[in-house]
Amino acid sequence: MPAPSKTDRNPGAQTVRRAIQALKLIASRTTEGMRLADVADTLGLERPTTHRLLKALAAEGMLTQHPGNRRYSLGSLVFELGLNATHQFNLIDLCRPMLNTLAEQTGDTTFLFVRSGNDAVCLSRVQGPYPIQTPAVPVGARQPLGVNAGGLALLSALTEREAQEITQAVAPRLVVYGHLNPEQIMEHWERAQANGYAQIGNRAVPGVTGVGLPVINEKGIPIAAITVAATTARMTPERVQEILPWLRQTTETIAQRL
């Protein structure tokens, strides 16, 4: 039997390695999450050891445990760390040419959003040439998922259960968005599911309506959202249908280049 490596003989390093293995494993089950017993069996660990490990990760925000089925899934801190690392993957730089093109095509303001926990964060914004531009969500702004078109697009790519859990979690923060409530967000989620795109108005910014689509990677995970926003009067049903082909082309191109 080979001698244990220096890493194996270091309890601290061993714990870190196990934590990373657990995070990778649970990340591979993003949709349904994982039970403690399944994590323990897959990693070959004793259940008490796995329980302590997962509880510690949950306490730090790296994991979250669903109250209904007790399964573990990735927590908000993972998204926070990912957001801080986005510059390393040139997401903003990669999307900027497509946002510029989309703004020129539509004449309106285009946005890049990413998910951070239960929020959508604006990473980039490009104004189009149309004379009347909207009061825009500023770069760096953070709003609950479902409040703006980008957040709704990201939410629409999740399961109904995940969407309901998120809307309940952000419920106390919704009152400032036109007295929006979780039930109304889920109605928007259902419409986005039915229509194949997200649309919401007069919530994130009064008098403004946006349409958006998620950028889905090859594993089926929503990693960003692209939106177009204009005054509500300008964003007619006919205008939405005119914008959608350009918006779809933009999100598909970004997904391919990623």
Image: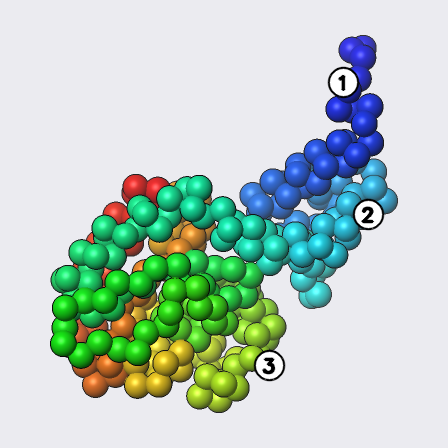
Q: Which residue is mark 1?
A: 5
Q: Residue furthest top?
A: 1
The residue at 21%/57% (across/down) is: 100
Res. 14 image quadrant: top right
* As drawn, 238 above or below 197: below
Q: Which residue is mark 3?
A: 172
Q: Earlier in the sequence, mark 1 or mark 2?
A: 1
Where is residue 167? Give x, y as percent.
54, 74
Where is residue 43? Give x, y as percent.
72, 35
User: Please, what secondary structure does the residue beneath circle 3 have?
Assistant: helix
The N terminus is located in which quarter?
A: top right
Instruction: Say which of 123 and 163 sits in front.
Output: 123
Kind of residue indicated by mark 2: Arg
Report, in whole angstroms, how far the alpha carbon at label 3 lies from the one at label 2.
31 Å
User: Please, what secondary structure does the residue beneath circle 1 have?
Assistant: loop
Kind of residue indicated by mark 1: Ser
Q: Earlier in the sequence, mark 3 or mark 2?
A: 2
* Residue 52: mark: 2
Report, in whole angstroms, how far the alpha carbon at label 3 lies from the one at label 1.
50 Å
Report, in whole angstroms, how far the alpha carbon at label 1 lies from the one at label 2.
24 Å
- Which class describes the residues within 10 Å of circle 2: few (<14), some (14-19), or many (20+)? few
* Left or right relative to 225: residue 169: right
- Asked which colour scheme the image uses, the reply is rainbow
Q: Is residue 245 visible?
A: no
Instruction: Say which of 136 and 238 sits in front.
Output: 136
